[in-house]
């Protein structure tokens, strides 16, 4: 996708930067002074704008905003932060950009699907919704330290690099904060526009909140009329979205691709869902009709603002979007984020231990038997209530140890990350420095509760991924309604103990959608595995994965040992291959920026300094 925007301060020096952005189809929105404020290219259907006096507000993205309502709400706005009141209660996923007397307010989403980035061009502060746009304008080179952090598994870049990007001198505004500029472009104090909810609601109360938020989120996807498409894997998350979309969409196209794992019963549940959606058009793809995972990865070039682990899936997703485009789809819905929102992380039991230790121990005893974890190891994990800062420091010292085991490894702020077996000592040193730097300022976790922190971190990793995929995939945009901020807030408001019921799969989602999704589908007790698809793709496309190791740019940068990586690819050791997707994503990204690939932004970029 080629949408982009750049924001400028209400200062005379910004005019020269605006001139550099002139191009065919570029749009311009001025400050009240008449000086350029927003320059870029975006879909007018994704914009809702209003002005009153010296206040200007632009909503870019998928939302329930109405221009008339926005105008009335900003009539009394006198300070940038007050512009946030104008969007209170809006559903969707969008940027909020405001200019009030030349002072600026800009923010994205708490889920990181929409982000705000900043840098300086000729001493003029500029902001944008894409880091690579600013990198091209400023001639920035990739940052090796950030790339090293991206190699870690499980991923922690969304928190460890909260205000950093993969480009030198391009900074990110943390997802929960807004960017504030004075009229001359001086940075104002950091303002936190979003806070995670306190998990305090009963299942019934939270279900009502989720029902409203999720229905509204899907409504923003169908509101434009016409045809929309959606995944129908057979899992509870995607199935629920299909039924919500079918209520409002002019026409719905569903897509199901059949997995290769004999233990995966997704096909059975997807067929039951299709029977209950007779008015929709259903596409069913066998393994032979859809590309394998890793297909084409050896020659893949995906210039984007950051590396994306889902290069594994690029051929499959491209094929999917091509097919739904042929059926007229203008937007594709995916169930990503549902697992994070409706399956409480095991570390909620450690949160519980601080307030109700005997209840927590009974539940922990049940879990440790299921996971075959020792009593003493579980007790040590629960009693070792380290701060988030201490967790970061411990993780920095454990990067080359064996991965944390089973149940006890999931009781901290999240499972500790590990360096891949093919990371060089130099890369490990960069990872260590990044984790220690993140700990240096005694950072707050994303939420006081470990389980909420874990959920938000994974939601933000997913938000980063879908943003990058929408920058690179041809066809309709992909939407993840479960990551809309209102849905995230509603889902995380439930008391974790209420959202975990033995024998019931995702009880909060089931309660929220009772009556909207057939009861026999909400009763599904599990989800299907895809390990067979992973290893099938690995076997068939091992040559493509091995080919880049002959002239690896990650190796040239000193971050990986290609011989160790080749050994892991040949032996298919499951534990060793967990970090593979991140490494492949980083290699593809570097190759995409190395010379002959397409420009990393949708207009002629500045020549990069070497």
Image (cartoon, rainbow, N blue to C red):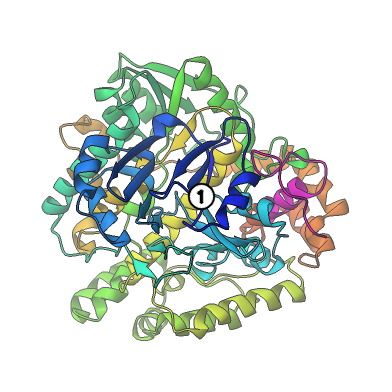
Percent coordinates x, y for residue 523 in the rendering:
24, 38
Can residue 502 be seen in this snapshot? no
Percent coordinates x, y for residue 279 in the rendering:
30, 13
Indicate whether 459 appears above or below 325.
Answer: below
Instruction: Give the camera-side residue of 538 and 4.
Output: 4
State which quadrant residue 131 falls in.
Answer: bottom right
State which quadrant residue 333 falls in.
Answer: top left
Percent coordinates x, y for residue 526 in the rendering:
35, 44
Residue 198 relative to residue 232: left or right: left
Magenta stretch: give its range.
583-610
Instruction: Give the camera-side residue of 412 and 362.
Output: 412
Quarter of the picture containing the N terminus is top right
Which residue is pictured at 45% across the width and 56% down the height? Answer: 460
Indicate whether 569 appears above or below 280.
Answer: below
Can residue 492 be seen in this snapshot? yes
The chief SS type of the magenta part is loop
Quarter of the picture containing the C terminus is bottom right
Specify whether residue 592 is painted magenta. yes
**What secondary structure is marked by label 1?**
loop
- Tag 1 residue: 129
Specify whether residue 228 is painted magenta. no
Percent coordinates x, y for residue 27 in the rendering:
51, 36
State which quadrant residue 276 falls in.
Answer: top left
Residue occupying the far right of the picture: 550
């Amino acid at each position: 996708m080629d949408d982009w925007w750049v924001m400028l301060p209400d200062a005379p020096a910004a005019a020269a930067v605006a001139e550099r952005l002139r191009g065919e189809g570029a749009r311009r929105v001025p400050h009240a002074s008449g000086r350029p404020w927003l320059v870029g290219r975006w879909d007018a259907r994704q914009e809702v704008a209003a002005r009153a006096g010296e206040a200007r507000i632009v909503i870019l993205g998928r939302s329930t905003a109405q221009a008339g309502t926005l105008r009335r709400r900003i009539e009394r706005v006198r300070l940038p932060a007050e512009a946030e009141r104008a969007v209170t209660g809006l559903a969707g996923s969008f940027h909020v950009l405001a200019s009030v007397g030349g002072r600026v307010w800009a923010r994205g989403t708490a889920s990181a699907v929409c982000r705000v980035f900043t840098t300086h061009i000729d001493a003029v502060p500029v902001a944008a919704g894409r880091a690579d746009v600013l990198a091209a304008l400023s001639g920035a080179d990739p940052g090796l330290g950030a790339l090293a952090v991206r190699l870690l598994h499980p991923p922690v870049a969304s928190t460890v690099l909260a205000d950093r990007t993969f480009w030198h001198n391009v900074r990110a505004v943390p997802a929960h904060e807004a960017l504030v500029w004075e009229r001359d472009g001086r940075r104002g104090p950091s303002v936190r526009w979003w806070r995670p909810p306190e998990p305090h609601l009963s299942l019934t109360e939270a279900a009502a909140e989720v029902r409203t938020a999720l229905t509204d989120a899907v409504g923003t996807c169908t509101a434009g009329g016409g045809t929309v498409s959606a995944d129908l894997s057979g899992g509870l998350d995607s199935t629920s979205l299909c039924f919500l979309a079918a209520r409002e969409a002019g026409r719905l196209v569903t897509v199901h691709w059949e997995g290769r794992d004999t233990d995966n019963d997704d096909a059975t549940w997807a067929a039951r869902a299709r029977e209950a959606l007779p008015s929709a058009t259903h596409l069913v793809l066998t393994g032979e009709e859809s590309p394998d995972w890793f297909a084409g990865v050896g020659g893949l070039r995906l210039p984007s603002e950051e590396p994306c682990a889902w290069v594994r899936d690029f051929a499959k997703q491209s094929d999917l979007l091509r097919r739904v485009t042929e059926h007229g789809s203008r937007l594709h819905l995916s169930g990503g984020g549902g697992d994070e929102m409706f399956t409480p992380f095991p570390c909620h039991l450690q949160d519980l231990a601080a307030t109700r230790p005997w209840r927590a121990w009974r539940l922990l005893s049940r879990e440790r038997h299921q996971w075959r974890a020792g009593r003493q190891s579980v007790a040590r994990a629960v009693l070792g209530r380290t701060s988030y800062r201490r967790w970061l420091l411990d993780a920095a010292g454990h990067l080359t140890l064996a991965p944390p085991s089973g149940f006890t490894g999931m009781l901290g702020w999240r499972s500790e990350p590990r360096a891949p077996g093919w990371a060089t000592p130099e890369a490990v040193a960069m990872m260590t420095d990044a984790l220690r730097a993140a700990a240096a300022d005694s950072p707050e976790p994303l939420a006081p509760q470990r389980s909420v922190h874990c959920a938000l971190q994974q939601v933000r990793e997913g938000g980063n991924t879908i943003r990058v995929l929408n920058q690179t995939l041809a066809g309709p945009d992909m939407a993840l309604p479960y990551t809309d901020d209102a849905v995230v807030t509603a889902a995380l408001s439930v008391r974790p103990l209420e959202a975990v019921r033995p024998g019931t799969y995702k009880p909060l989602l089931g309660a929220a959608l009772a009556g909207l999704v057939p009861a026999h589908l909400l009763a599904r007790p599990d989800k299907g595995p895809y390990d067979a698809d992973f290893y099938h793709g690995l076997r068939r496309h091992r040559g493509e994965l091995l080919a880049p190791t002959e002239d690896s740019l990650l190796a040239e940068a000193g971050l990986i040992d290609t011989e160790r990586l080749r050994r892991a690819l040949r032996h298919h050791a499951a534990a060793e291959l967990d970090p593979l997707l991140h490494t492949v994503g980083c290699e593809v990204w570097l190759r995409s920026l190395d010379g002959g690939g397409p420009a990393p932004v949708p207009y002629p970029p500045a020549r990069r300094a070497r």
